Amino acid sequence: MSDLYHLVGPPASGKRTVGLELARLTGAVLIDNHLFNDAVFRPYGADGLRALPPEIHALAAQVRALDPEAARMAPPDVSHIFTSDLTNRPSGPAALQLVRDLAAARKARYIPVWLTCAASELERRVGQPERQERAKIRDPLALRAMLATSGVLPPPPDALVIDTTHFPAGKTAARIAAHAAEREPE
């Protein structure tokens, strides 16, 4: 049986970093939310500081739609790690359901993980230089405004919640892997 790990958290909460460690521990394929965004953001010239127009977000959404289709076609023994920044906007619950449905279609165990982090630490992390190479948000004020207007989708009852403020990525990934090992097969 394969697993579908779903790492959800706001920008700079460590989704990709934890996902890389989790992939190393489990052998699961990491499908970072910027994998598909970058196909659109890079040619546009996104720098993580300037706001992107709605047309660019809509184009990125079209590319992201290929993500679950490719994963659905994967061999049954392939596990996946998806990362998502899910907000309180209507697209948040819909995106959560899409990943849950993908796990069900693949007959994979769905393992939702919510990564939380103190706002002050998120704001510190968005300034990290490595975020520029992935065209990720880098402006602390823009992050603060985004969190204030869109929020973060609350974790569902079956989610493992981990505060990454002071918890290193390697330990977070180990905790997720241990949590998955403890769960009964679905």
Image (cartoon, grey):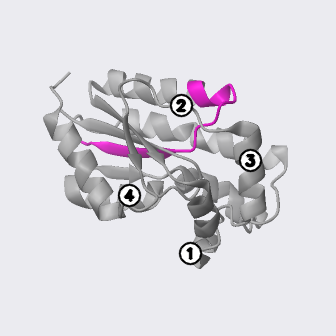
Say which residue label 3 marks: 146
Say which residue label 2 marks: 154
Say which residue label 1 marks: 130
Residue 25 x/y as whole percent: 21, 57
Residue displayed at 61% across by 31% down: 92
Q: Mark 1 or 2 closer to N-term?
A: 1
Query: Would residue 185 appear left or right of 52 to someone viewing this image?
Result: left
Dot 4: element: helix
Asked whether the beta carbons under mark 2 and mark 3 sit within 8 Å of each other, the answer is: no
Other residues around mark 4 within 10 Å, as few (<14) / some (14–19) / many (≥20): many
Q: Mark 4 or 1 closer to N-term?
A: 4
Where are the magenta residues, as a range? 78-93
Residue type pointed to by label 4:
Val
Badge count: 4
**Marks 2 and 4, how far apart in space?**
20 Å
Residue displayed at 80% across by 54% down: 52
Residue 103, above or below 146:
above
Residue 156, above or below 75:
above
Q: Is residue 83 magenta?
A: yes
Query: Would residue 149 appear left or right of 124 to someone viewing this image?
Result: right
